[in-house]
Each structure stands twice: as C-alpha cells, then as structure tokens.
Amino acid sequence: MSDSPLKRKVRDVLVSPKIGDDVQVQGWVRTKRESKAGLTFLEVNDGSYFQNLQVVVPADLPNYTTEIPKLYPGSSVTVIGKEVQSQGGKQAVEVQAREVSLLGACDPSVYPIGKQKMTYEYLRDFTHLRSRTNTFSAIARVRNVLSMAIHGFFQERGFLWLHTPIITANDAEGAGQMFRVTTLDMEKPPRKEDGGVDFAKDFFGGGVNLTVSGQLEAEAYACSMGNVYTFGPTFRAENSHTSRHLAEFWMVEPEMAFADLEDDARLAEDFLKHLLRNVLEKCPLEMEFFKQRVEPTILETLHSVVDNPFKRLTYTEAVEVLKKSGETFKYAVEWGIDLQSEHERYLTEKVFKAPVILTDYPKGIKAFYMKLNPDGKTVRAMDVLVPGIGEIIGGAQREDREDVLVSRIKEMGMHEGPLWWYLDLRRFGSVPHAGFGLGFERLVQFVTGMGNIRDVIPFPRTPGNIHI
Ligand code: 4AD
Ligand code: MG
C-alpha cells in the first residue's frame, strides 16, 4: 500500500528512534495488557532485538472490540502508528498505534509457548517454536555474532575459508564413528560372494559416510595455500548421552602450514579471546540476560578468560597434578588414560581457575595423524579446556614424515590404502603444519552458560532423538 509508512525493525525503532515519525512494525505479540484507562499495551517482538517494542493501542481504533481482544501471545500483527517518547520507565520509545491488524491468530488454548516458566526440556519438543522465547532468541543471536567473529578473526589474518566436503570416503579421526551414506535398497542390498553388502554397487562406487571432521582435506589445502580454515557441520555416530555431545555439530578447523604446536596453541588462545570479546561487545543485552537467568558468574568468567593468559602444561604434568590432588574421581587417574570431563573440569575450575592448554598426550589415546614426539610415547596433541565445559578445542601438530605416519597408521590397526592421497602430502614437499578444531556448540555453551548442548543448536540431533 502506497500510504503505509516506512517499515522498521523493532531493533531500529529502539536503538535509533525517530520520535514523531510514522512507522510500520510487524512482529509477534509477546504479551498483551489492558489498562484500566481503556488502553491496550502490546509487547511486540520481531526477532531483531532482545527487547520488545511497546505498542500502545487506543480504545478508539475501529477494531478495538473485535480484533484486538484476539491478539493473544504468539499472534502476528502489523502495527502502524507514530514513534513517541515512552511514558513508562523501561524504554525511551514506544509506538502509539493508529492501526493494528491481526495477520495470523494464535489460539492460547493450544499454543505450547506460554507465559509460565517452561523448562528447557519441555521446549526441546518444540524446537520450531522455542526461538520465540527470550532464551532461545538470545542464543540464536549469539550464534550469529560468533559465526561472523570466526570469519572476521581468520579473514583479518589472511586465512582462506575452505569448503571441505560433507560426504567423504575418509574417516578423519580413525575412530569409526561415522554415519554411512547410501542409496542402496536396504531391504535387499546387493551382496558380495562372502555375503557382505556390495558397496561397489552403491552410488559412489564405494563406501562413503558423513564427515567427522574437515581436517584431512584442510591439510591438503594448507599444504599449498598456507593458512586455511573450515567452518561447517560434522557428524558423529557416537552413542554419547551427555550434555556436551551431539550427533551433528558445527566445527571450526584452522590449519596452518609452516607451523608447530606452539603456533597452534597461540592461535587457539588468541582465537577464543577474540570470540569472547566480540560477544561481550556486540551482545550486551543477551549477556546480561544469561547472567540473570542462566549463570550468575558468566560475565566474570568471560572477562577473566579474555584478560588472563591460558595455563599451559603437558598431559604428564596434568596427570601428576590430578594424582596429587587428593580428590577422588569416578575414573581413577593413571598415566595413559583418556582424561574424562571430571578431570578436565577439575584442572580448569579448581586448580588453575583459567583455561588450560594440555599438550603431548599419550599416542594410544589420540588420532593417527598427530606428530610423534622423540620419546616415542607421546604425540604433539593439544586440548584446550575451559571452566564448565572441559574440552572445547582439540588439535595437534601433524605427522609430516611419511614413514612415521605409515607406521602409526598400521600401529592403530588402520589401512593406509584409502589415505594414499594424505600420504602424498608428505611425499611432495612436506612441511610442518598444525591445526585444531573448535566445537562451535561447546563454544556457545561456554559463552552463554547453558548447561545442555541440545539447547544451543537450533535443531539438535542426539541418539534416539530427531524431532524436526
Ligand atoms: O577433538 P576432536 O575430535 O578433533 C578433531 O576432530 C580434529 N580433526 C580437529 C582438528 O585438529 N582439525 O573434535 C574437536 C572439537 C572438540 O574439542 C569438541 O569441542 C568438539 O569438536 N566435539 C563435539 N562437539 C559436540 N558434539 C560432539 N559429539 C563432539 N565431538 C567433538
Ligand atoms: Mg578431542
């Protein structure tokens, strides 16, 4: 309609009000309140800002007694009116409506999102609606800011954004936790002579799966382009029912040529600090909300991480610290064990009260591609541990010697055949190189203080659960 005033987002009206101007705003009603003075107040949110826009609906609107009473929470509206100085204390500006029309009704008797306190667990059954709540819309905006901060960090440093494949024939972690991708008829698949499924007849002419990590392909590009990074979805068919594991999660994986573990650790520390600074700066309202509603210490924690150096020690030193601690852990600590989240959290929360970078893990508990140390027992691995989460980053300097890599592959009971191309990188101008993977959802958990990883990704996938 030509006489409709300019459409503005709630954010724009609240952040840069144009008092006295006509405006059109569209959004969803969060709350409705009728005042004794014969007015109705609507709180409207369109997802652009943490705060709602207050709309004052005067009783003399033609649809005041017909349509306005039907504006239940969740219904969508178009509001036309004037931006005015707010009478109430909460905000500087509100909209004095002269036209309010209901776009889509929302029946309160069946709408699952109520005003009463809903648990996160309850909301997991409504992942398509939970972003209408303060918590989940705040998380969505934090994810967005973090994503851009990731690109900003690497782009400023000249890293090339590389798109690694989702469908792959590699098992990048050598852990066998992959989802198979197939177009074979699973009711009656073609069989080999030995009775096994004949994947040579499958779409790609061989067995393929969803990627568990873009690292191996990133190494190929690092060994020509220098510094690269990937940022994409990864998939793990691990049967972990914890608050830190998803079957589909996003991972950021930088890979640097002519770099060692020291360079890797420095990059990881700078990177995490950069991301936290960005959120603190760009999401003040969201962070205040997380402090009040989710984790009272969250701001102190993030500021302290930004302001203090990370603690570095070797796995062997960490095991000593844990053994001497006198603490009884569920899993006893011995050199050679894979550290559990209880151990990681004890180190970062109780002992050092800061993020910890652990290096040089026993080769038996780490992936085949990590560079073997001269001791023959440990590898140039690095895990970054943070309070509340434990491991948030896993990385390593890569084994760049072909012969050592081949013997490590064999030692781990893997086949070198499918890795022929990966070995090529060690044959043709091999260079020291290193990288890491940051679990994006663990980062979002860390930043927001949210306890369960299922609540920091829009549509979580976990064993036995896929709602949408
Ligand atoms: O330690 P991971 O398995 O390391 C790798 O995948 C390497 N290829 C990374 C590299 O060097 N380029 O995974 C890296 C991070 C973990 O530290 C953790 O934050 C996250 O990915 N992660 C998960 N996040 C959610 N759900 C899961 N199931 C995860 N598994 C790993
Ligand atoms: Mg790891």
Image (cartoon, rainbow, N blue to C red):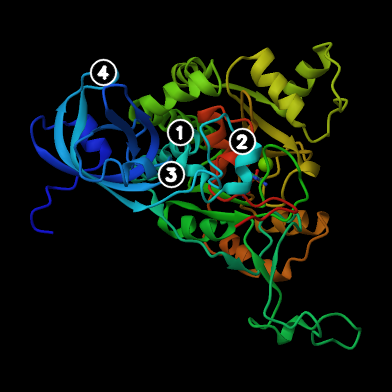
Residue 238 appears in the rendering: yes
Please name the residue shown 54% across and 15% down the image: 297
Q: Which of marks 2 and 4 is in front?
A: 4
Q: Which amino acid, by three-letter code, is at mark 1? A: Asn
Disc 1 to disc 2, how far (Cα)?
A: 12 Å
**Left or right: where 395 falls relative to 290:** right
Picture disc at residue 134 = 1
Residue 406: x and y in percent read 73, 59
* Coordinates of residue 185 in the picture (x, y in percent): 74, 83
Q: State the image quarter where residue 47 is shown.
A: top left
Of the residues under marks 2 and 4, which one precedes in the sequence?
4
Check disc 2 and give the amino acid type. Answer: Tyr
Q: Which mark is residue 53?
A: none
Q: Mark 2 points at which residue?
A: 120
Q: How far apart are marks 1 and 3 (CA)?
A: 13 Å
- Answer with mark 1 or mark 3, whichever residue precedes in sequence: 3
- The residue that disc 3 covers is 74
The circle drawn on residue 88 is 4
